[in-house]
Image (cartoon, rainbow, N blue to C red):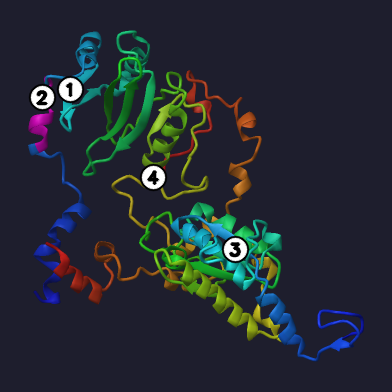
């Protein structure tokens, strides 16, 4: 790629550079990630703090929170998602343009967290594909920034040659669960964080249960 | 204590909670079943004099909160009188909710009232047996009861006769697993997670939040004389 008119490198000299297309495309993509904030709970407070001046997401090229999914690159799901909200989340994801990435911020979005109940999606990865999971309840802004930088690292390793394969999505899958029945069952299995629920459900005892016994008065 | 013994003593309290009380608790019944607790609120005495046959009992809760149990068949008349009578004038309906004690005991519908001019609170309860979960709607007395009664219907399955819009309000419109706050409802719901996810994604969000929703639904008032003509959903 050559540019012969006065440019950023100074006037009067032919300014061009040689590079790999993958590098320059990925460089542009990863440094102008526009997040689509899908904040439903306390994680969204931390997400707002990340965008505010103290932590300043703009340093990483993400100063524009895109409230339109059509102009967004990375979906940040911050907070718990009940089943009633599931079709909304799925539709926003379907409306986002390729290439797109997804961050599951916090315990509830990643696994349902403590809300292992009838009304709550047990991890948004049953609904949309997730690139980065950020643990925490809620994660600190540094955690979200680290997660976004991991997305940037992921973009750095992508290639236009196999990009279509990496992010392939069946158009017919729009509005459908991402995972099959078996995978949903595995993903939504309860963790060892709820002693009483595990006992009532008849699941095998975990070490967490054995230790919880000691905590009882 | 070894982990092997975890099914023993320390968890017996949890197991009791899971199983629910076997039946009406005798110890609790001894005190609360008395018909004459000296009320702190003069409304209780007046209500008892005005509706002697509908007055079931009254009790004092948490020190100074007056609770009146009334006949569910007379709820409309009693609450209408409490709203309109100048000596009572409970013009603010703070909450409508319900309590399921489990173990086959009746469900309680709770009306929390507040009188702005008299600055007094009153809690009216009526007990509905599990095979007749139906009570008169009070939307004609306090318009604010609309969503509160929808919530009670949604989560407990109690039908409100004459409600103008008897739909679910919190759970999805196509929810088919029952009423989640009932004691016999399993914590994780009745369907598998895969089925729940599939059903959730078949919802169309626009169905419930269309801008013209209010205007469109206004004519669909259920005729109190013929509640069957309404679009009430089946229980369960």
Describe the element under mark 4 as helix, strand or loop.
Answer: loop
Q: Does label 2 lie on the same chain as label 4?
A: yes
Residue B184 coordinates in the image, percent (x, y):
29, 48
Question: Tag 2 or tag 4, which sits nearer the N-term?
Answer: 2
Q: Does label 1 lie on the same chain as label 4?
A: yes
Q: Chain of mark 3?
A: A
Question: Tag 1 or tag 4, which sits nearer the N-term?
Answer: 1
What is the spatial separation of the Cα atoms under label 3 and label 2, in whole angstroms? 57 Å
What is the spatial separation of the Cα atoms under label 2 and label 1, in whole angstroms? 7 Å
Q: Which mark is residue B77?
A: none
Give the quarter of the figure containing the C terminus of chain A: bottom left
Residue lying at the far front of the rendered structure: A11
Q: How would you rate the neighbour count of disc 4 (Cα within 10 Å): few for under 14, some for 14-19, many for 20 or more?
A: many
Q: Are marks 2 and 1 in contact (CB under 8 Å)?
A: yes
Identify the residue under disc 4.
Answer: B179
Q: Is residue B34 magenta?
A: yes
Where are the magenta residues, as a range? B28-36
Q: Does label 2 lie on the same chain as label 3?
A: no
| Residue B119 seen from this side | yes
Q: Is residue A96 magenta?
A: no
Describe the element under mark 2 as helix, strand or loop.
Answer: loop
Q: Does label 1 lie on the same chain as label 2?
A: yes
Query: Does residue A88 lie above or below A184 as drawn?
Result: above
Question: Tag 1 or tag 2, which sits nearer the N-term?
Answer: 2
Identify the residue under disc 2.
Answer: B34
Residue B163 coordinates in the image, percent (x, y):
47, 27
Q: Are marks 3 and 4 in contact (CB under 8 Å)?
A: no
**Direction from residue A18 to residue B44 in the image, left or right:** left
What is the spatial separation of the Cα atoms under label 4 and label 2, in whole angstroms? 32 Å
Q: How would you rate the neighbour count of disc 1 (Cα within 10 Å): few for under 14, some for 14-19, many for 20 or more?
A: some
């Amino acid at each position: 790629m050559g540019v012969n008119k006065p440019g950023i490198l100074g006037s009067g000299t032919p300014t061009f550079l040689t590079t790999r297309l993958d590098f320059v495309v990925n460089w542009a993509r990863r440094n102008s990630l526009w997040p689509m904030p899908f904040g439903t709970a306390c994680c969204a407070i931390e997400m707002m703090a990340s965008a505010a001046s103290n932590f300043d997401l703009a340093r990483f090229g993400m100063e524009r929170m895109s409230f339109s999914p059509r102009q967004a690159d990375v979906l940040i799901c911050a907070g718990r998602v009940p089943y009633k909200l599931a079709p909304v989340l799925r539709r926003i994801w379907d409306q986002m343009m390729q290439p797109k990435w997804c961050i599951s911020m916090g315990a509830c979005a990643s696994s349902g967290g403590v809300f292992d109940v009838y009304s709550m999606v047990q991890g948004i990865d049953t609904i949309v594909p997730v690139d980065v999971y950020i643990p925490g309840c809620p994660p600190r802004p540094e955690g979200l920034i680290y997660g976004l930088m991991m997305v940037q690292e992921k973009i750095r390793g992508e290639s236009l040659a196999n990009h279509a394969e990496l992010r392939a999505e069946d158009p017919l899958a729009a509005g459908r669960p991402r995972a099959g029945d078996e995978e949903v069952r595995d993903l939504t299995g309860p963790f060892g964080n709820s002693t009483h629920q595990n006992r009532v459900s008849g699941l095998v005892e975990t070490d967490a249960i054995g230790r919880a016994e000691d905590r009882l008065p | 204590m070894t982990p092997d013994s975890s099914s023993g003593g320390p968890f017996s309290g949890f197991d009791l909670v899971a199983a629910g009380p076997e039946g009406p608790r005798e110890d609790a019944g001894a005190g609360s079943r008395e018909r004459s607790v000296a009320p702190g609120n003069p409304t209780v005495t007046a209500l008892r004099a005005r509706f002697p046959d509908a007055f079931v009992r009254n009790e004092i809760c948490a020190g100074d909160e007056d609770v009146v149990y009334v006949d569910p068949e007379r709820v409309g008349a009693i609450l209408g009188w409490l709203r309109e009578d100048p000596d009572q004038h409970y013009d603010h309906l703070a909450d409508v909710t319900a309590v399921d004690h489990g173990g086959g005991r009746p469900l309680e519908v709770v009306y929390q009232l507040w009188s702005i001019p008299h600055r007094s609170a009153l809690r009216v309860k009526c007990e509905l047996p599990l095979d007749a979960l139906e009570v008169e709607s009070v939307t004609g007395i306090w318009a604010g009861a609309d969503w509160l009664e929808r919530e009670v219907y949604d989560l407990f399955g109690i039908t409100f006769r004459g409600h103008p819009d008897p739909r679910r309000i919190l759970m999805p419109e196509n929810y088919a697993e029952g009423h989640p706050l009932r004691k016999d409802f399993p914590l994780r719901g009745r369907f598998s997670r895969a089925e729940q996810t599939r059903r959730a994604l078949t919802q169309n969000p626009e169905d419930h939040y269309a801008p013209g929703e209010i205007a469109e639904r206004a004519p669909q008032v259920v005729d109190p004389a013929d509640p069957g003509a309404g679009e009430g959903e089946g229980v369960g």
